Image (tube, helix red, strand yellow):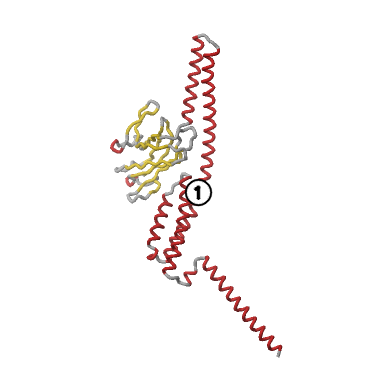
Amino acid sequence: MESDNSRENESKLKRLVTLLTILVFLLAGWILLDRLGLVDRFIPQSKERFVENAQVKLDSVAEQLNLRLIQIKKLGGKVSELETAKAQILGDQKHLNEIDPAEFQKKLNYYLHLLGQKDAEIKKLKKENVVLILRNDSLSREAQILKVGLVNIQKALEDSSKTFGLKERELSEKSRVLEIRNKELTEKVSAAAALRAEGVNVYAISSRGKESSVNNQKARKVDKIRVMFHLQENSLANKEIKAVFLRIIEPTGTTISDYNLGSGTFDFKGRELTFTSRQRIFYENNHQSVEFIYSRPNGFKPGKHEIELYAEGYLIGLGTFEVR
């Protein structure tokens, strides 16, 4: 009798263990499907639950996109693609009731892929900025040395006239030499404080406002371009309003100009140069980006075009683009 009860209890225990094992596997499978985003494929969710979950996911993605946008903008990168994605998310959020779950998953995958691309871009921009900081530090040290030399020469000039009582002719000659050196150092300090443009890029803008690289596009189809560049940080340059001149030189050597569109002339080292466009900016000394939008209704001539940028009497940057 006791043997029969023991076998019966053992049989019940085995069935209970088997049932618990099945439940554990089912629960583990459910968790795995949920993490892989496959639950909805096997168990359709209600429209209300889908909209609620989709809204949470889009809010999270939008927040991450905004963080990347702020980082890239601070590093001087291009953020138009992120701004477009943010606008698309806002549109998606307004029409979640109309979006098919499969279509929504495609959109979500695109946004996540874009986040990965921008993370790689941020790493690249950080490396480039390290190089720029080192170059700027070197320039600042050289300028500081020039300033010290200028002060010493000015002091020597004052001391020579007060202390030694040189003859008038000798004093005049020495003063002239010192003044020449003083002028040379002043010009070097001024040159060190000049703006420097880098990363000059040119984009073609279509009639729909879409941007793409202008190089190798058909000349007759390019009637509007955007010239974009960054101004290096320079501790010697004053934070103030500065005029930046843009010259676009055709393959024939002629500077593109249209006085109805704001073209004109400016003085450069005693010569009068024609400029294509001019822009007044406030120099903030933070590696800021500057851009020119220029329209040419008749299109550009085929061939290589030169870009020249000037400010405060200095040539501050160069670039090129070529259309066919």
Residue ID for mark 1: 122
The residue lying at 48 percent from left, 57 percent from top is 113
Asked if one can make out residue 80 in the rendered structure from this viewpoint, the answer is yes
| Residue 90 % position (x, y) | 40, 57
In the image, 265: left or right of 233? left
Q: Which of the 4 image quadrants contains residue 15?
A: bottom right
- Where residue 141 appears, as percent x and y from the top left, is 54, 32
Q: Residue at x 53, y 40 (%)?
A: 131
Q: Residue furthest right?
A: 2
Figure quadrant of the C terminus: top left
- Residue reaching furthest left? 260
Check disc 1: other Cα within 10 Å, few if <14, some if 14-19, many if 20+: some
Q: Residue at x 68, y 87 (%)?
A: 5
User: For this rendering, which residue is in front, 185 or 61?
Assistant: 61
Look at the image and tell me whether residue 251 can be seen: no
Q: Height in image: 282 above or below 114?
A: above
Furthest residue toward bottom: 1
Above or below, 303 relative to 185: below
Near-viewer residue (125 or 160): 160
Give coordinates of residue 166: x percent, y percent: 53, 10
- Point out residue 150 in the picture as x, y percentages from the top left corner: 52, 24
